[in-house]
Amino acid sequence: MQDAGLSEDAGRWRRVLVSGGDPHAPVPGCAASTGRRCSRGAAMSPATTPDPTASGLADGRRGAEIGAGPSVLTLTMNPTIDLCWEIDHLELIGKNRARVRSVAAGGGGINVARHVMRFGLPATAVHTAGGEVGLRLNRLLDEEGIDHVAVDIDDDTREALVLVEAESRRSHHIVPPGPRLHDREGQWCLEVLQRVGGRHPYVVASGSLPGGLPADFYGGVARRVKGAGSRLILDTSGPALREALEEGVFLLRCNRTEAESLTGGTVRTFDDARSLNEHLITTGAAEVAVTTLGALGALCSTRHGHSELYAPPLPGKPLSDAGAGDSMVAALTTQLATGADPVSACALGVATAAAAMLTPSTESFDLDVARALRSKVRIIGS
């Protein structure tokens, strides 16, 4: 498949396609393009945006066939390159000799897109990219076979470090705040989202906001997604979360820390979560509210009621919760996109989050384990 209909625009962003077409063919409408990437100064015409659902994508690393079902769009405003190093034992004084375990593109929406593809649906990740690290981020996504749209920014994309201690099997996550964006860069991202969002029934905005963007940025995302006739699934924290709820979203996923920031109190039990979810639903902040409760499970709420989903017993020792949230969001989004009801979708999400706990650092969960754990998720409606 080949990019077509690109026209000059004030925004600086590029469309990257991962299958089909001649990789060396010029991109129509883009004066300075090589391969399948549109260079700075080009924007995509909404009338001729390629349809990722027709691309026949395949995840080469995992051999998963990507079907022609509804495509999911994700947004990652503060992506990262996740560097995972492994040591035998962390010495507090002196050198620690490390082995490079993995290097991968990361950030909430990118991780969700990766896992949606693993579940068999097409996905496109919209993300920022700046500096040499941003160029490497694009290359990593290309190599992994993830369809993506990169919005150029001036500041450098961040890198994060996961240090795995083999002896104790502990993971240490070191994450910098990331770049600072100009107002115009945030507007470019919103313009890209508005142009490509309408052909995706579900849009997932996940992760923190970088510095420089207003706290109501995700509120602007919500308005554009609703205006395009799509549904927004939001997973973020802090002031960005509060401001987005003023606009309202289709589905909000909160962990305990995020839930407590909204309530100002402790959220540890299903009853605690029920009070929050009830408020979110009745005020119109969310049509579906999912509050996760760690090892206990999650509460899924709609206007029809609340369902307690108990996490399944793990078949092994939990190693890391770093990827559990993104894995859960990917699973429930995939289920919703293929017609499942919110509770059933959330059940697979809980199972997938549990499967993610069994992997070290930010490594992907085992699909077979996630599917097997789904039958062990106990659901109690109210």
Image (spheres, rainbow, N blue to C red):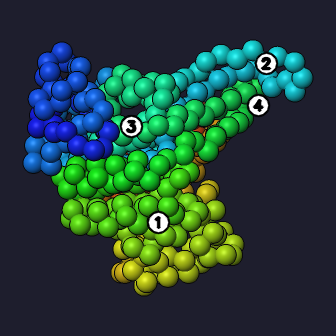
Q: Which element is circle 4 on? A: loop
Q: In the rendering, at what x and y percent does residue 264 appear? A: 67, 75
**Nearest to N terminus: mark 4 or mark 2:** 2
Q: Write down the residue under mark 3.
A: 152
Q: Quadrant of residue 237?
A: bottom right
Q: In this view, does 239 lie above or below 3?
A: below
Residue depicted at x 62% and y 56%: 295
> Nearest the camera: 5 or 98?
5
Q: How crowded is mark 3: few (under 14 residues within 10 Å), some or many (20 or more)?
A: many
**Residue assigned mark 1:** 216
Question: Element under label 1?
Answer: loop
Amino acid at circle 4: Ser
Q: Earlier in the sequence, mark 2 or mark 3?
A: 2
1 or 4: mark nearer the eye = 1
64 relative to 245 in the view: left or right: left
Tell me the distance, in whole angstroms, between the alpha carbons under discs 1 and 3: 21 Å
Q: Residue 96's mark?
A: 2
Return the disc, 1 or 4, that comes first in the chain's sequence. Answer: 4
The answer to whether mark 1 and mark 3 are in CB contact below 8 A is: no
Left or right, 42 with respect to 232, comes to left
Q: Which of marks 2 and 1 is in front?
A: 1
Mark 4 is surrounded, within 10 Å at the Cα level, by few (under 14), some (14 to 19) or many (20 or more) other residues, namely few
The residue at which mark 4 appears reads as 168
Dot 1: few (<14), some (14–19), or many (≥20) neighbours within 10 Å? Answer: some
Q: Residues within 10 Å of mark 2 (few under 14, many from 20)?
A: few
Q: Earlier in the sequence, mark 2 or mark 1?
A: 2
At 57% across and 32% down in the image, what residue appears? 159
